[in-house]
Amino acid sequence: MPTTPVIRVTDADLEDLRARLRATRWAEPWPLDGWEAGTSAAELRRLVAYWASGYDWRAHEAAVNTLPSHFADIGGTPVHYLRYDGEHPGALPIVLTHGWPSTVLELTALAERLAAPSRHGGDARDAFTVVVPSLPGFAFSPQRPTLGGGEQTHDLWHRLMHDHLGFARYAAHGGDLGAGITSRLAEAHPEALVGIHLLAVAAPADHDPASSTPEERAYLASVAAWQAEEGGYLHQQATRPLTLAPPP
């Protein structure tokens, strides 16, 4: 367990946030309903009102600070992670990787069930020792100082699991962005991976389109069509992210 809180926000910062939320100047309605052009104005107003007046920050902050947080320095890269030891000795290690734009908090309930299945109607012999790292730039793992170069996230995860924590072999799970990282992890370090579980299928790092089957080509075409119709946010953030989120 951490000896000091991993998050502590001052009362002044919280009040400043609430004041700015309450002072939001809303855009004129767009002549489309709901989510057709992006964000539902009604839903956004509801969320802002809840965040300004209904959300109990201190209760959630206290809950985050009770989580089994740890920090590691992986070749100069700080990595925050949660660790849940399995309820029986020798439990198989597994690394769970969250997606975008989420955090490790989406995986705590799963981690607790994997580490202590007997508390949830399962068999203690099926327990895992669970490691849940924060992606660089997400929550408590700081953003890397430079883009490009350096180790990729899947290599950081292997060094965390294998070198830092001492697990010779381990399993891995990921969804969304985490599914791609998990796939790359298995490709790069097959000797260490017992198996992987994915909530999405990532394309291989390199492949020859000429070798694709008709079914694979049809799938890739459907992905391209979806990205052209629905993937504007992905292209924007991959090419000009600071248009949407300039640094403070």
Image: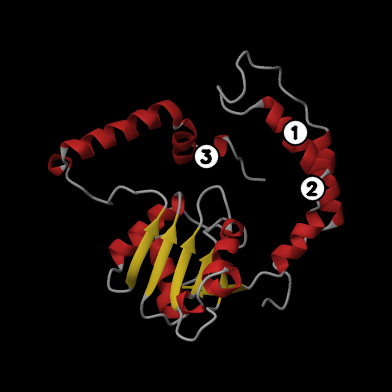
Q: Residue furthest front?
A: 121
- Taking depth in this image into account, of 7 and 64 the one nearest to the observer is 64
**Residue at image location 16% in from the left, 40% down from the top:** 213
Q: Which label was assigned to residue 46? A: 1
Q: x%, y% of residue 231?
A: 44, 32
Tag in front: 2 or 3: 2
Calculate the distance from the C-alpha at mark 2 to the C-alpha at mark 3: 28 Å
Q: Position of residue 64 (x, y in %)?
A: 70, 63
Quadrant hosting residue 225: top left
Q: What residue is shown with label 2?
A: 55
* 44 or 6: nearer the viewer: 44
Residue 198 placement (x, y as % from top left): 39, 55
Report which residue position mark 3 lands on. 241
Q: Position of residue 170 (x, y in %)?
A: 39, 74
Contact, mark 1 vs mark 2 (Cβ under 8 Å): no
Of callouts 1 and 3, the N-terminal one: 1
Q: Which label's residue is closer to the chain start, 1 or 2? A: 1
Please report the residue visible at 43 percent of the width from the left and 67 percent of the height from the top: 157
Amino acid type indicated by mark 2: Tyr
Q: Quadrant of residue 110?
A: bottom right
Q: Distance between the Cα atoms at labels 1 and 3?
A: 26 Å
Image label count: 3
Q: Is 77 situated above or below 238?
A: below
Task: Identify residue type, mark 3.
Answer: Pro
Decide which of 50, 136 is in the foreground and name it: 50
Left or right? Give the position of 59 relative to 174: right
Mark 2 or mark 3: name the one nearer the start of the chain: 2
Left or right: residue 97 versus residue 202 is right
